[in-house]
Image (cartoon, rainbow, N blue to C red):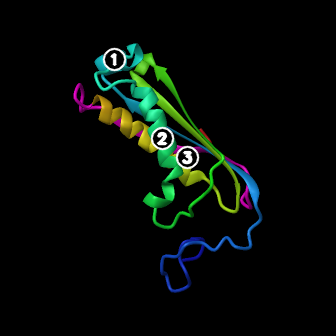
Amino acid sequence: MSGFTHFDEQGNAIMVDVTDKAVTERTAVASGCIRLSSQVFDIIRNGTAKKGDVLGTARIAGIMAAKRTSDLIPLCHPLMLTKVTIDFSLEEATNSIQCICTVKLSGKTGVEMEALTGVSVALLTIYDMCKAVDRGMELGEIHLVEKMGGKSGHFVREK
């Protein structure tokens, strides 16, 4: 299992021991999008969804999800996050909404999973709030955009 940190020598799943790692500033940025019908796009843009503020609710859900990542992903460490942001951009040409989640902390392990979880749950919340109008929405392109800090250094996804 060379190269995989979540397995021991016998191939058993383990939580990585970060006891001896240095505390450093760490940041991760993840992105994803949801494609919508023009009707749903207009409802969100105009703020007329029957369930309320779609993007505001999705923002809170994404922040909450990032904070609870270790409850969802079995081998993630519980982390004391210092910042989580969820930002949206509406792309009228494609009837889609881009979501960006940025997560920061000072700690011994990275926050990539928290950023990816934040994006995923924010997009799922948009789907949930709008599914009565259109069940054909499509979530996709969820990926790590950038990671800073820690032993592995700076990562920027190539386009």
Q: Which quadrant, please, contains the N terminus?
A: bottom right
Marks 3 and 1, how far apart at CA? 27 Å
Pointer 3 with pointer 1, Cβ within 8 A:
no
Q: Is residue 139 magenta?
A: yes
Q: Is residue 142 visible?
A: no
Which amino acid type corresponds to the residue marked 1 in the rendered image?
Ile
Marks 2 and 3, how far apart at CA? 9 Å
Residue drawn at the location 34% of the way across and 26% of the way down: 36
Q: Which quadrant, please, contains the C terminus?
A: top right
State the residue position of label 2.
Answer: 62
Which amino acid type corresponds to the residue marked 3 in the rendered image?
Ala
Residue 158 x %, y %: 62, 42
Magenta residues span 131-155
Q: Quadrant of residue 37?
A: top left
Residue 28 x %, y %: 63, 46
State the residue position of label 3.
Answer: 115
Q: Nearer the viewer, mark 2 or mark 3?
A: 2
> Which secondary structure, mark 2?
helix
Residue 131 x %, y %: 26, 31
Which amino acid type corresponds to the residue marked 2 in the rendered image?
Gly
Q: Is residue 91 above or below residue 82?
A: above
> Which secondary structure, mark 3?
helix
Q: Quadrant of residue 121?
A: top left
State the residue position of label 1.
Answer: 43
For marks 3 and 1, the one nearer the N-term is 1
Q: Is residue 78 above or below residue 48?
A: below
Few, some or many C-alpha atoms within 10 Å of disc 2 (few <14, some 14-19, many ≥20)? Answer: many
Q: Is residue 30 magenta?
A: no
